[in-house]
Image (cartoon, coloured by chain):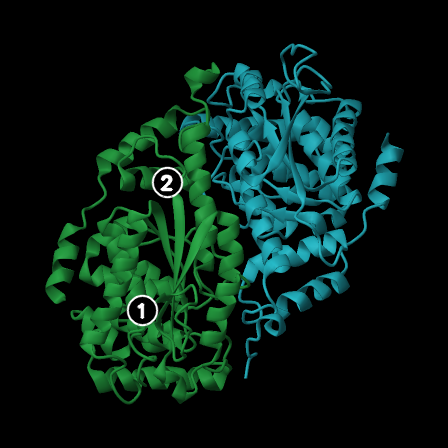
Chain colours: A cyan, B green
Amino acid sequence: MEAALRELVDRIQPVENAWLAKAQARLDALTKPPGSLGRLEELAARFVAIRQVEMPPLPQKRVVVFAADHGVVAEGVSAYPQEVTYQMVYNFLRGGAGINVLARQAGAEVEVVDIGVNHDFHPELPLVHRKVAWGTRNFAREPALSREEALKALWVGVERAREAAQAGVEVLAAGDMGIGNTTAAAALGAVFTGRPVATLTGRGTGIDDQALRHKVAVINRALSLHRVEAADPIGALAAVGGLEIAGIAGLILGAAATRQAFLLDGFIATAGALVAAHLAPTVTDYLIATHRSAEPGHQIMLDALNLKPLLAFHMRLGEGTGAALGMLLLEAGLRIYREMATFAEAGVSEKA
Amino acid sequence: MEAALRELVDRIQPVENAWLAKAQARLDALTKPPGSLGRLEELAARFVAIRQVEMPPLPQKRVVVFAADHGVVAEGVSAYPQEVTYQMVYNFLRGGAGINVLARQAGAEVEVVDIGVNHDFHPELPLVHRKVAWGTRNFAREPALSREEALKALWVGVERAREAAQAGVEVLAAGDMGIGNTTAAAALGAVFTGRPVATLTGRGTGIDDQALRHKVAVINRALSLHRVEAADPIGALAAVGGLEIAGIAGLILGAAATRQAFLLDGFIATAGALVAAHLAPTVTDYLIATHRSAEPGHQIMLDALNLKPLLAFHMRLGEGTGAALGMLLLEAGLRIYREMATFAEAGVSEKA
């Protein structure tokens, strides 16, 4: 499978400046001062350059929500009990969660993937059943996953991206559900940015000061226990990662390989992006950072990827909720690109 | 008319904390950690408290675009010729301008008001015909408007807000079109914030360094010529304002008096908000600042109103384009409020 991964990585092409310039030329002909729609123009140009289509239709969108459990919750790092992971999966399937609401508004499909929930879902539930394990092991004591499990979970993500591309999806995002997953994401953030664990670790779903100090200590202990290195992204994912984070990393690689724009959600999704970018640096050409999470470490991780978030809404729910808002904004940029009149069409005088 | 204005101002009630708390109680019962949807929750609570309705339907929205000309363009303060104002009005009517595109996405109506364009529009055009004057006079030499004209233009805005309320609109925004209007807005900004003109003056549609220095000098000269004072908002509006800015100020007062949420656009709209807030400080309870403009003075003006913008997209088009994006985000907050399942409904465990 590592050979297949190398082949996938080789297939990811950079986004071409010539396409960005072509898109900007149209934007500059529209009835507005050049550049006056700021980041909306940037979004439109990026999408055109990703798709390499001069007048793209409004895209089909999908949010793939990966759900998985985390053995490290045994250390008392979360404010919520582990069963919330599977309970929330049922909430997704009934359409009552935040991501369902925001995806409906954005006109995006929601696909829910059981990539490692510690619960037995009935096989007829409308889930993508891809359970790699019944949650990770407690990485405070042993590696979260074997290398094979990490790769297998990553590959689940790659295949979800391919399936989306085949279904005509052009804008993809990942969501996450997994009690304990900010602990894994902060650990990976520390590995890939080289910054102290304390700067990358936040309150997650809402732990108090004492639990926060404990969470930092748990991560620091795990990192010395496993001797994790940024140069081995799969090794890092296996040692202190999570199954949903592996799925997200794979989804990002698969999206870039199939030229889908990838709307990057918050803290957990960005941990996945760090893994993907350490396997294939070019994936960042396909990433649009949608929001800066309330988790203090998120900005550090976005900086490491050289991405500027669209929103800073103090959100920290995950599930892909920030990405769904980003879809509205990307669509706004594309509508501007497609629907605004040019100076010539409208008979408006240009700059003196 | 000043008596009618006093009566209107007296009718504006503060938004009640009890309603904000009631809305937050529902938000806290939804299947997410409390507060984890950040500013989306803030938007929903604000709207509920403005409307005083426990489960508000998704609101009807309208953008009122006021168009007017500016005598001060004779001083060479703009990158575009004056005829662009009326040419853009035709573009609005054909649906080809930025605001048309973004309002369509947001599901908002666009109403175009000729409040003072230097052009003779056919009376059968689907405009709201309320021309107060054929543009302002050149305030570098004489007052832009008489006190009566300023009040008359303000009252046009009040009446557009009343008409909107009668039509069932609950979310209102103002847009602007007027070559030269960043000069008037910067002058008003300096009056109402007390900050130096140079810090409030930007490149508008795109003037160069020399023209920018000249623009600052023109405004400084006008402010000493007219001895403008913040304590007399109507006097300031008459001396260095604009007809569309007066209309916007009136629209804001009228929106607050009829309990419509007002989505505040960029630099020009915020100049109108400063006028309105100096007549009735309580209007800020009804304002949602949608974006921070690329005009450097905008943040100073937002700070003076104690408003935090939702977006910082480097936009500087006006027309209400930022407000239309804000409508998407407000709707996202309201959908969360209305459609998410509670912990009890979804059978999800609460915080330990």
The number of callouts visible is 2
- Would residue B238 be visible to someone looking at this image? yes
Q: Position of residue A28 (x, y in %)?
A: 62, 69
Label 1 sits on a secondary structure element that is loop
Q: Which residue is situated farthest in the left direction here?
A: B3
Q: Which mark is residue B86?
A: none
A44 vs A29, nearest the viewer:
A29
Q: Quadrant of residue B331?
A: top left
Which corner quadrant of the image does residue B29 belong to?
top left
Pointer 1 residue: B130
Looking at the image, residue A58 sits to the left or right of residue A267; the answer is right
Judging by the rendered image, the residue that carries numbered circle 2 is B42
**Crowd band around label 2 with a 10 angstrom C-alpha radius: few (<14), some (14–19), many (20+):** some
Give the x, y percent position of residue B134: 34, 80
Tell me the quarter of the picture where residue B16 sits: top left
Mark with earlier residue (1, 2): 2
| Residue at disc 2, secondary structure | helix
Check the residue under mark 2 and report the chain it is in. Answer: B
> Residue at position x 86%, y 29% from top?
A1
